[in-house]
Image: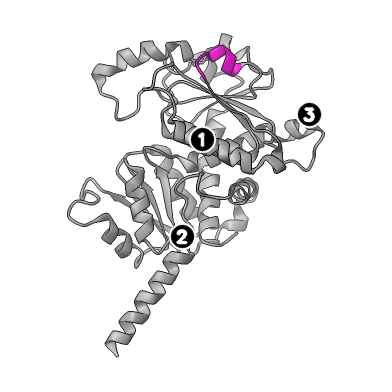
Amino acid sequence: MEKNEKLKKNSEQELKKNSKQDLLSLNDVSTEFILDVIEKAIDIKKNPEKYSSALKGKTLLMIFEKPSLRTRVSFEVGMTQMGGHAIYYDVATSPLGKKETIEDTGKVVSRYVDIVMARLFKFEDCKKLAENATVPVIDALSDMNHPCQILCDLMTIKEKLGKLNNSVNNDVNSNGLKGLTLAYLGDCKNNVTYSLMHGCAHVGMNIKVACPNDKEYMPEQRIVDEARMIAKKNIKLYGEIKIEVLHDAKEAVKNADIVYTDSWMSYHIPKELMEARKQKLMPFQVTAQLMKYAKPTSVFMNCLPAMRGMEQTAEVVDGAQSIVFDQAENRLHAQKAIMLKLLGKI
């Protein structure tokens, strides 16, 4: 009898694992998934009371190897505001994969919680966690991906430019993002750039990334190819989508609708290398003068934290075109939509 019960339990767990959906990379999800999350996030922001008990009785586990203000607060507050509960787990007290394998961790926590969010150093570790968990797993940032941030960014762009863009294109039925051009400047060999490339290709946006002509700062060709493949699959939906890698800031920003940058000094950069990086990246600093090459209606974005005088000047990040704090706020609404989507509530 005990053997039969054990087999039944294992079978149920395997069924859960095969039927659940994760959010690990925007390269792995459908265009429909992304558009659904964006639409739901906008509705959540407008009508938060509608979702006040949407995740009642649900528990989110938040696993952190890398610290973050916005990620932790937005997920924890988001879960609470929808009637659920969030648990913070700092792996510094018990390093992931050391005394217990990541595979075992995935299997164990699935017996306790309904959904897992992991902010880890390595994407492969997040992937391994998801492969062994029977509940949805969210990559809240790893070395290769930052899908939650980019879903928030796309929501913010639609919120700010969607109606104007549809009016210009005389297409009220458009998703509000089709045909827009985003210019990303700075270090392009990072998770934000990669997820932006994937995300833009899904929603019909052109993207130009500009960085030094140096492999240390250039995106991996594999990622560029993945984004172009998504664009190719969506050609009937949007027409041609341009994914470009450039080495001139002005060329990238020219006629852009969105100018985006990110920190030059990530957590893993040793102090002794910071000055050399700064000098290499200074030609890609976003200044008020550079912003003049973009469209008059353009907006400036940075996923924060922002270092004034580094990747952008204070005049830009604190200026009228900057939407960085609306962008930061929208992490809350986008995170809510992501959890609802993965838990089958939308």
Q: Is residue 272 magenta?
A: no
Report the amino acid beneath label 2: Gly
Q: Earlier in the sequence, mark 1 or mark 2?
A: 2
Residue 84 is marked as: 2
Residue 168 is marked as: 3
Relative height, residue 61 to residue 45 (above, below)? below
Residue at 65 percent across and 24 percent down: it is 257
Where does the magenta region start and end? Answer: 246-253
Across and down, in percent, residue 164 comes to 74, 31
**How far is the residue under mark 3 from the one under mark 2?**
42 Å
In what element is the residue under mark 3?
helix
Asked if the residue at tag 2 contacts the one at tag 1, i.e. Cβ–Cβ closer than 8 Å, the answer is no
By secondary structure, the bulk of the magenta-drawn segment is best described as helix
Residue 42 is marked as: none
**How far is the residue under mark 3 from the one under mark 1?**
30 Å
**Looking at this view, is 48 or 200 the one in front?**
200
Depth check, mark 3 against mark 1: the one in front is 1
Q: Earlier in the sequence, mark 3 or mark 1?
A: 3
